[in-house]
Image (spheres, rainbow, N blue to C red):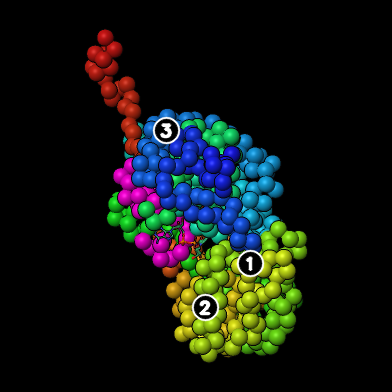
């Protein structure tokens, strides 16, 4: 197990993975991993030393020499086995995730499942990594491309999807023939480590996948290390911008998926019941801690009259620990996250928004120490308010109004973020107009959380992303490979004559 009681028999410690071995860090810096529903300390995670992090990169560099030559079928078969192991261990993975992150067990299974889909995609690497060829581009000349792995790649992941997001990264990178150094979120690395353990069991050779733990120093080492060729990051806009600038200044490829403020536009012709239910799930589900959540709803025209019903429905959501059945909203990840969310709700009131449903300080029987905040609804929100400008990352919904679809589209397009958006309507013409005019990378039409399946790529845009290529799908193959274009000419016997070949054969 990657999380074991240390020799004193105290709290278990999370291991590093270096050169195929799960090792105890020699660091003096540790952080507690805390169950957000109970405040129980589940384990301690090390902040790896510089020597340990260097050793992880060195082991990835060494392993690349042989891994890059491993036949594509052999690479694919590891991911076929891996997807099977993830399926077999789904319940255990979800339980670990819920304990350390807080989301409900069904949500935790969803988190693992969305990552599993990327693993299935990685098993298809044979067709994904094919180059192109043009025959006879000039007399006797053919041109073709090789999609070659680039070397050691690294991934830095956030707390909110500790299964899915690591699985966006290392399976595709490794399937392409690269080796990998992963730095999971220090808030909830235990499910990530269980997934890493299963990856090793599936047959990923020693050194091909390595894991370091830590915070700022680990992230900066990844951005600076000369042997790391590409960095994938998912997390906040502030850190992602830092990672992108630092990594690219050091000559690395970087892709950074960052913060969001996603809007739903509700047209008055939308099917009322289904639309309101979709809004509830997308705004308050996973306690609002999804980068594709819908924290802003723009009610167009008469749709504004649906607000009281939305509030009544929000009141029925059940707040409880993620392990309890029937829970709709679990705790947020940490005490500091709770404090920040409650502070922003206070600011919304101070700045003049109407607090129609106040979710602060709910009483949750049996979990009085949990980091709970219930569904919260503000109306009368304007673009100048802090609750609109900042990513709250909690179950807080800001309701705005617009006179027509174009006015609503203007609000969305003026927001700096471009992760996701959705429209609810019965009108094909309105939906098509929205699809064409909206300046957001992932668009839902009567779909509240339009995260693409791995046949496509995650395509957030504008302030939500730095770097041209997104995770998974075809784009990530381009990110994790270098195209090498070969132009070759083989001369006919008649053109060569017999001079050179005859001499070289003697
Ligand atoms: P975060 O930026 O705080 O942390 C992400 C990673 O960066 C972690 O591994 C963390 O250890 C590291 N880190 C934190 N502070 C750092 C610093 N000062 N310097 C260097 N590294 C640092 O993000 P989070 O709170 O874990 O996750 C939530 C955020 O992630 C939200 O903004 C959310 O929108 C975003 N997110 C975006 C997507 C997307 O696809 N666009 C997906 C999931 C989450």
Residue wearing tag 1: 369
Q: Is residue 33 left or right of residue 59?
A: right
Among numbered discs 2 and 3, the one appearing first in the sequence: 3
Q: Residues within 10 Å of mark 1 (few under 14, many from 20)?
A: some
Residue that label 3 marks: 63
Horizontal side, residue 325 vs residue 407: left or right: right
Q: Which mark is residue 215?
A: none
Asked which quadrant contains residue 380, the reply is bottom right
Residue range of the region highlighted in magenta in the rendering:
218-242
Residue shown at 69% from the left, 81% from the top:
311
Compared with 221, 263 (above or below) is below
Q: Residue at x 32, y 32 (%)?
A: 489
State whether label 2 is within 8 Å of ligand 1: no
**As drawn, 202 above or below 27:** above
Label drawn at residue 343? 2
Image quadrant occupied by the C terminus: top left
Q: Tag 1, which secondary structure? A: loop
- x then y, percent, for residue 217: 37, 53
User: What is the x, y in percent for residue 112?
Assistant: 62, 51
Q: Is residue 352 above or below residue 22?
A: below
Asked whether disc 2 touches disc 3, contact meaning CB atoms under 8 Å apart, the reply is no
Residue at 42%, 55% (x, y): give it.
215
């Amino acid at each position: 197990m990657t999380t074991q009681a240390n020799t004193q028999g105290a709290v278990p410690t999370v291991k590093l993975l270096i050169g195929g071995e799960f090792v105890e860090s020699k660091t003096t810096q540790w952080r507690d991993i805390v169950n957000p529903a109970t405040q129980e300390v589940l384990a301690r995670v090390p902040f790896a030393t510089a020597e340990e992090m260097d050793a992880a990169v060195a082991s990835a560099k060494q392993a690349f020499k042989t891994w890059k030559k491993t036949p594509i079928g052999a690479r694919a078969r590891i991911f076929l086995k891996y997807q099977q192991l993830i399926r077999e261990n789904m319940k255990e993975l979800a339980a670990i995730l819920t304990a350390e992150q807080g989301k409900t067990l069904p949500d935790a299974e969803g988190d693992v499942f969305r990552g599993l889909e990327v693993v299935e995609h990685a098993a298809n690497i044979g067709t994904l990594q094919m180059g192109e060829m043009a025959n006879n581009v000039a007399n006797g000349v053919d041109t073709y491309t090789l999609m070659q792995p680039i070397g050691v790649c690294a991934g830095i992941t956030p707390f909110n999807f500790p299964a899915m997001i690591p699985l966006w990264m290392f399976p595709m990178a490794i399937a392409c023939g690269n080796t990998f150094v992963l730095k999971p979120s220090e808030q909830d690395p235990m499910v990530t480590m269980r997934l890493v353990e299963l990856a090793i069991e599936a047959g990923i050779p020693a050194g091909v996948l390595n894991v370091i733990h830590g915070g700022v120093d680990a992230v900066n080492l990844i951005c600076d290390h000369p042997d790391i060729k590409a960095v994938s990051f998912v997390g906040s806009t502030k850190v992602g911008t830092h990672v992108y600038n630092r990594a690219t200044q050091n000559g690395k490829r970087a892709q950074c998926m960052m913060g969001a403020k996603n809007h739903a536009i509700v047209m008055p012709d939308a099917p009322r019941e289904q639309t309101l239910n979709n809004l509830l799930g997308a705004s308050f589900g996973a306690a609002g801690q999804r980068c594709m959540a819908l924290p802003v709803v723009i009610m167009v025209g008469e749709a504004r009259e649906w607000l009281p019903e939305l509030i009544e429905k929000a009141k029925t959501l059940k707040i409880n620990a993620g392990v309890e059945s029937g829970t709709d909203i679990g705790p947020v990840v940490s005490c500091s996250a709770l404090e920040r969310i409650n502070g922003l709700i206070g600011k919304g009131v101070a700045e003049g928004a109407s607090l129609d449903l106040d979710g602060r300080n709910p009483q949750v029987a049996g979990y009085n120490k949990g980091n709970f905040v219930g569904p919260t609804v503000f109306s009368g929100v304007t673009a100048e308010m802090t609750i609109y400008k900042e990513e709250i990352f909690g179950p807080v919904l800001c309701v705005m109004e617009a006179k027509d679809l174009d006015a609503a589209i203007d609000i969305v397009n003026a927001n700096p973020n471009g992760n996701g958006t959705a429209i609810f309507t019965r009108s094909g013409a309105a939906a098509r107009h929205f699809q064409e005019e909206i300046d957001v990378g992932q668009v839902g039409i009567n779909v509240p959380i339009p995260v693409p399946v791995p046949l496509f790529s995650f395509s957030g845009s504008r302030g939500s992303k730095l770097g041209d290529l997104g995770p998974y799908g075809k784009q990530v193959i381009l990110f994790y490979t270098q195209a090498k274009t070969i132009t070759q000419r083989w001369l006919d016997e008649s053109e060569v004559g017999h001079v050179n070949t005859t001499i070289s054969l003697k």
